[in-house]
Amino acid sequence: MGIQYLQESSVFHLQSKNTSYAMKVTKQGYLAHLYWGRKVSGHGLERLLELQGRASFSPNPDLEELALSLDTLPQEYPSYGGSDFRTPALQVQLADGSTVTELLYASHRIVPGKPALEGLPAVYTEQDDEAETLEITLKDEHAGLQVMLSYTVFRDSDAIARSARLLNTGGGPLKVLRALSMSLDMADDRYEQLQLSGTWARERYIHRRRLVPGMQSVESRRGSSSHMQNPFVALLSEGATEEHGSAYGVSLVYSGSFAAGTEVDQFHSARLFAGINPFDFSWLLEPGDSFQTPEAIIVFSDQGIGGMSRTYHDLYRSRLCRGTFRDQARPILVNNWEATYFNFDADKIESIAQAGSELGIELFVLDDGWFGKRDDDRTSLGDWFVDRRKLPNGLEDLVARVNRLGLSFGLWFEPEMISPDSELYRAHPDWCLHVEGRRRTQARQQLILDVSREDVQQHIVSTISAILSSAPITYVKWDMNRNMTEIGSAKLPPERQRETAHRYMLGLYSVLERITTAFPHVLFESCSGGGGRFDPGMLYYMPQTWTSDNSDAVSRLKIQYGTSIVYPVSSMGAHVSAVPNHQVGRVTSLETRGNVALSGNFGYELDLTKFTAEENEIVKEQVQLYKNIRHLVQFGDFYRLLSPFEGNETAWMFVSKAKDEAFVVFVSVLQEAHARLSRIKLQGLAPDKQYRLEGSDGTPYGGDDLMYAGMPTPQFHGDYASRCYHFKALPSSMKKE
Ligand code: DGJ
């Protein structure tokens, strides 16, 4: 790891273990992008900057150097108004109404470690020697604007963290219209763009498309990162696979409206960018004020998409997620949502917990419906006091009853919401996001609290804290079930209304910081109708997310596979639910539901009291199996073997860091007559180790045999069939090392 500044050539060369990233200050002072990719020694990097005169439609800012146009110069943080017509990273309006800015290099410094981002989630270091940070200051003297670009390289990760901080150094106000987190110009456009898109109950499906001239981007205008698009894109060398080819990932650490994508210009260079969505955004910077963009984590891998994913997994698991549970085994839970919906009482809950206790389940989670007068989803959000009709002796009594059975207790909240039919709304009708004189559009018959307001933030912190202090609650499911409409705040002046959505996110992050640090023993799981806010921003505060409201085992293959492109498996909640499945109506076996859910933070979401004796035995085995392999699932390396997007069969596996244990899951969706015989090649094992398959006669398999020759795929009779395999290295083969 290291950051070098080569004075003679004004080149910055950032090196991680396997990658290099290089920039150059041109003689005019522009910050040009030179290179990002496989590690190089860096001799003559400046030669990569080839300036080529183009037609007069690419204008020239410097008459001494007519080959230079900002329209063709590969840049690090392009601004609008000069000779660059491509999509800018920055657009600022000055007091005179103009929107022209020109950023020139002013200074730089290199610091050990990684400074925190004020008020925003970000990747962090625990020791200064884990990373080094380069801060480059660019200035527009005329505007009185300073932009500090930050680049962190890590000792143990091939990731780079990028962000920008704007400072108004002038005497008048500046209006930021656009301030992306990162932008960089790839020399050519011979890539495919990968994105993760979907909808509610079908989140993060993988889509790949060849780059073509023009804009190819994803965005959310919903006030949250959304089910529809994830704040992530990757450029892949043509034909890149899980194991081969180059992958350049960009992941935005943000939970609000975002934009990310690639613009291919007239000369076939590709501008990759990500940041807060400039649509309906602006930010007023008074003299002396600063604005910090969210962070983008960029990852290069020449080991295919799988290599890129594992870099994200390791970094996000260990240096984005925080708190007591970051490195702790996550409990097996049972959640009552699909078991009872709103229709439960204390005895019913206790009976489910009792069944859970006999099956070896560790945590009971009480979902929606325990507060206010909430018998359906039309009322009571905001009234966070126990519904004594359902729980006559209160929460403390219920928690004690569950605890006595040997299970810990978790509770559902939807703290950012307010039902029009609630005591809170009757007391504070202006506490929701709204625009005076306009309709307040409801979704699920609820409105959104204006979390940009300090008084609303304080109210959320104190009400949720009071409940968490009232009983030994060790887990919280933090839900959020709608997107923003009529985005406005009663507290902000007209010229700041377009700041509301981002201020909401800052307010939410502040609330989460306060609550999660006050209750370090509580495991927080975020949720937004399943995976509507499955993003790195939320993972900073809550180390796991309910992956999707779709709990069907077959649907989950694509959802979990797509999610794993960026997010570690330790961040994904995965539960066994009842059949016919409540979302898609499919009937799958208990074995397959278990085998798919075992590849996540495992749990059950059905009425455990309804199992037959035979099902009880299957579940006991599943629970025991998960206890045996959860260290692999939650902390091992993840390899995708067969894609559900490409065929009838899905396979993935987990390997311990020491390569002494592995767990493989194989699922065949539809059965075919006389299906072709095939072999599945494992990955990530030690070729020179021998492995024993648990539950077999003990005949050893060579790691090399399993990876290079493979193993026969199982033959099934019937649809939605699956099998899993648990390998352990033989101690004798381990000694060979
Ligand atoms: C949406 C969540 O995704 C579900 O799991 C459940 O908690 C419901 N909300 C409760 O309203």
Image (cartoon, rainbow, N blue to C red):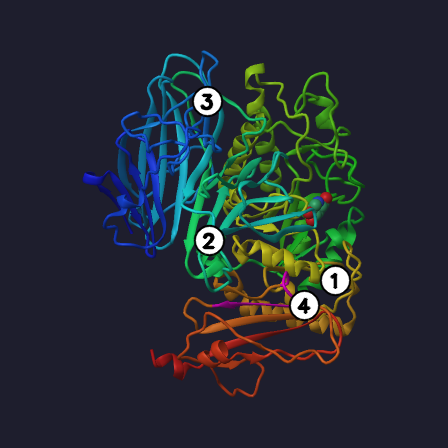
Estimate the spatial distance between the alpha carbons at disc 2 and disc 1, rounded to whole Å: 36 Å
Crowd band around label 2 with a 10 angstrom C-alpha radius: few (<14), some (14–19), many (20+): many
The residue at the point 39 percent across, 34 percent down is 54
Q: Earlier in the sequence, mark 4 or mark 3?
A: 3
Q: Amino acid at mark 4?
A: Asn
On whether residue 447 falls in the magenta region, the answer is no
Q: Earlier in the sequence, mark 2 or mark 1?
A: 2
Residue under numbered circle 1: 608
| Residue behind label 3 places its C-beta within 8 angstroms of ligand 1 | no
Q: Are marks 3 and 1 in contact (CB under 8 Å)?
A: no
Region of the chain picked out in magenta, as a range: 644-655
Estimate the spatial distance between the alpha carbons at disc 3 and disc 2, rounded to whole Å: 32 Å
Q: Earlier in the sequence, mark 2 or mark 4?
A: 2
**Disc 2 vs disc 4: which is toward the camera?**
4
User: Toward the viewer: 26 or 150?
Assistant: 26
Residue 388 at x, y percent in the picture: 76, 40
The secondary element bearing badge 2 is classed as helix
Q: Are marks 2 and 1 in contact (CB under 8 Å)?
A: no
**Disc 1 vs disc 4: which is toward the camera?**
4
Would residue 126 be visible to someone looking at this image? no
Crowd band around label 1 with a 10 angstrom C-alpha radius: few (<14), some (14–19), many (20+): many
Q: Earlier in the sequence, mark 1 or mark 4?
A: 1
Q: Which mark is residue 648?
A: 4
Q: Are marks 2 and 4 in contact (CB under 8 Å)?
A: no
Estimate the spatial distance between the alpha carbons at disc 3 and disc 1, rounded to whole Å: 58 Å
**Disc 2 vs disc 1: which is toward the camera?**
2
Which corner quadrant of the image does residue 586 belong to? Answer: bottom right
| Residue behind label 2 places its C-beta within 8 angstroms of ligand 1 | no
The secondary element bearing badge 3 is classed as strand
Estimate the spatial distance between the alpha carbons at disc 1 and disc 4, rounded to whole Å: 31 Å
Residue 50 at x, y percent in the picture: 32, 41
